[in-house]
Amino acid sequence: MRLVCAAVATLLFSPSIAHAQAGWTAVQQPGQPTAARVQVPGTSLRGVAVTCDRGRPLMAVRLATKATARAARGRLIVGAAIHEVGLARIGTSETWMIPITDPALLGRMAAGGVASLHVTGMPPAGFPLAGADAAFAAALASCYKPSAATALPSSAPTARATGGLAATDLAAIETVVRRAYAYEETGPSLMTPRADAIAAECAALQTRYDRKLGESESFGLCSEDAGALCGCQDMDEAVLKRTLRVTAAEIAPGRARAIARFALFTGEPATRSVTLELVKAPTGWKIDRVGSEQATQLDGIIKMRKALGLAAWTPPMDR
């Protein structure tokens, strides 16, 4: 463990980190384990790296802080999932180790979007997840197994179960995703109670926040500045519906990840994509997370409740 910590610290402090790509990359230095890492310029969180330690994933973060503590508690928010984490400092350096105990965490990070780290006594900081899937697959072979995406046809459901999902589940997931992209406002909610509760809490806080600080001061805090499903502010809805293709894979029992790929306008390739997570509820499959929307809403809730002098809010469980 001590040797692994030192190796990851070296990767985070390596001068080459300043010249790394914007997204995650797999890196290895002579005599050291392979790791996946990303730089985060301009924030208190300067870098994040993940490696394998005796078959288990281990994360390291480089924090620019004057804190003298050797241990800390925090929250790692990926999508709408909140992971309580413990941080242990390497000596007096800026590098802190975070053992990963939830096997679903790396899968959520590999889905893309953004994540944020909230450490007690330090300002929160976000970091990108672009390229994490490929970097994890290349660097974490002994402690991470990527989920193979299962392609869903554009019309008839698949005739076989793949990746742990039955044919009926694959068809149901596609139906829910396509209904979401049809922007249907009638009938039962397509979202989980958790997702609906996060959106409702954020919207309610916006009213109070604007009343205190001024009209529209909360704009964007609940991810309403762009459409989460398309990641855009403008589109040709007919083109989106016509080009929409869906892939899905099981990431845990009763939970699946779907990737929607589409074009927004005539003449552009259907290469835009948004990742959704779905949960199988007693009433059928429900959308629990859409891109980084829930992460933005949770960050907004934390900011607004703090400004309003309100206690922390914990969203309900997934099911």
Image (cartoon, grey):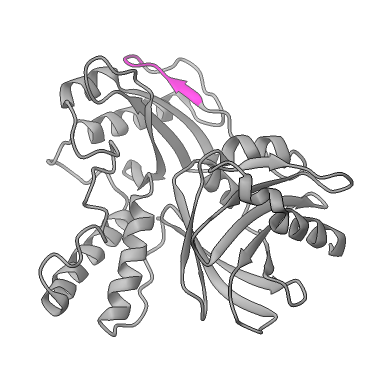
Question: Would you say residue 8 is visible in this rendering?
Answer: yes
Asked whether residue 58 is in view, the answer is no
Res 62 quadrant in image = bottom right
Q: Is residue 152 magenta?
A: yes
Image side of residue 190 versus residue 121, left or right:
left
Residue furthest right as drawn: 31
Q: Position of residue 18 (x, y in %)?
A: 62, 51
The picture places residue 292, in percent across and down from the top left corner, at 38, 49
Return the residue nearer the eye: 256 or 235.
Answer: 235
At 32% from the left and 72% from the top, the residue drawn is: 303
User: Where 160 falls versus 55 (above or below)?
Assistant: above
Q: Quadrant of residue 48?
A: bottom right
Question: In the picture, which quadrant includes the N terminus?
Answer: bottom right
Q: Quadrant of the C terminus?
A: bottom left
Question: Which residue occupies the foreground of this view, 157 or 247?
Answer: 247
Residue at x-position 72% and y-position 40%: 139
43 magenta-colored: no
Which region of the structure is painted magenta?
150-156
Instruction: State the image coordinates of residue 318 (x, y, percent, origin top left).
Output: 41, 56
Is 148 situated above or below 211? above
Question: 85 left or right of 232?
Answer: right
Residue 185 sits in which quadrant?
A: top left
Q: Residue at x 73, y 50 (%)?
A: 51
Is residue 33 rendered to the left or right of residue 35?
right
Number of numbered markers: 0
Image spot of residue 228 (x, y percent): 28, 43
Q: Residue at x 27, y 29 (%)?
A: 178
